[in-house]
Amino acid sequence: MTEKQNRTLPAQPALCRILDANLDRSREGLRIIEEWCRFGLNSADLALVCKQLRQELAFWHTPELRSARDTPADPGTELTHPQEEQRGSIQQLLAANFCRVEEALRVLEEYGKVYDPNMGKAFKQMRYRVYTLESDLLAYRRYQQLLRSQLYLVTSPKYNFLTIVEAALQGGVTLVQYRDKASDDGVKLANVRQLCELCHRYDALLIVNDRVDLAIAADADGVHLGQQDLSVAEARKLLGPGRIIGSSTTNGEEMQRAIDAGADYIGVGPVYETPTKANKPATGLDYVRYAASKSPVPWFAIGGIDINNLDEVLNAGAQRVATVRSIMDAEQPTLVTQFFISQLIRMQHLKAQKALQATT
């Protein structure tokens, strides 16, 4: 790091107070983000980036700036906003603290130009690095959530679909897809925005079926594409690296194309005949077995799966399943969701026990 230039005149007390306050603000915000990278995401790489940024901020936090602090006379200590007193989810907490850090760095960049020419340059570059960190953290969090998700709820158009989805979220669903082939775009966008806010309140991911534009407009977590939709590669150009892209597949050839194109996960099916895929013949359990032995990316068995045939799908090798009607048409969506998840966890434990026995 470049040594700070010597100044011939003492800095104004107000300038020093501004720099001190924003150095504190940015360091505190980064520490909050770092704790989640370390303990929430278990990512040493992201935690290290935060730590390095905090250390660089500490370099500029000189005794001169600290000595200008006058907390009792600071009118800002009495100012607050209701949103500062509430955090509805980890995502909201992280977003608020990234905003806090980025705003503070912008203040440091502008006022730093008056204090030291090198300071403005340093904080400008640091601000861009925080933008990158925010994108990387969000992409990492989304993918880790995808890996942890075993049950995938795909919605169907219903007047009370938000109530049903919330019931499923309360039952433990962490991955939801908005699917609506019939409504006007204005209705779809309004629904996606509401559903996005609901899912994020429960720290769940929201994927939009088919429509990259709606996913971007509503800041959803990704898209799911069919074989006749925009290609995975083209969708990635529009969405960037930070959002999830899934692809429907019905056979090994389609699976390989989706994986080669960079799909983050694939749908495997329809396993059984289903009215949501009326024109597609069922792939049966053979394709489930094929995916279990061949797919290097997360995959979800989908198509006509319900509480009556779930065991045979799991016994064929599925570790993740997607469902529409079993939850969307259920009288008690929360209980059905909990049943699905309990069976998926039970099968996961059985497979782990068998693997352990095979090594002993």
Image: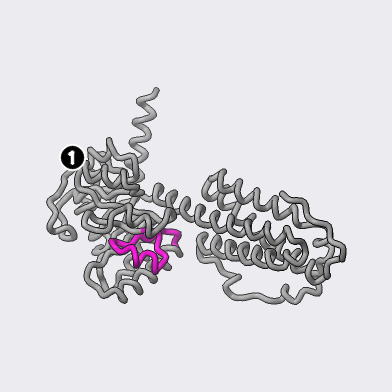
Location of residue 329 (image quadrant): bottom left
Q: Residue at x 16, y 45 (%)?
A: 284
Q: Secondary structure at mark 1?
A: helix
Q: How is the image coloured?
A: one colour
Q: Is residue 339 visible?
A: no
Q: Residue at x 73, y 65 (%)?
A: 113
Q: Amino acid at mark 1?
A: Asp
339 magenta-colored: no
State the image coordinates of residue 192 (x, y, percent, origin top left). Answer: 35, 69
State the image coordinates of residue 324 (x, y, percent, origin top left). Answer: 25, 59
Magenta residues, start to end: 202-222
Residue 90 placement, left or right of 225: right
State the image coordinates of residue 148 (x, y, percent, origin top left). Answer: 41, 48
Location of residue 325 (image quadrant): bottom left
Residue ranking furthest to the top = 360
211 magenta-colored: yes
The residue nearer to you, when weighing 118 against 348, is 118
Residue 128 placement, left or right of 194: right
The residue nearer to you, when weighing 227 against 203, is 227
Q: Residue at x 82, y 69 (%)?
A: 70
| Within-10-Å neighbours for mark 1: few <14, some 14–19, many 20+ | few
Q: How many marks?
A: 1
Q: Residue at x 60, y 70 (%)?
A: 85
Kindly identify which residue carries mark 1: 286
Q: Is residue 115 visible?
A: yes
User: If the image is split into quadrants, where does the C terminus sit?
Assistant: top left
In the figure, 59 relative to 315: above or below?
below
State the image coordinates of residue 35 (x, y, percent, origin top left). Answer: 60, 52
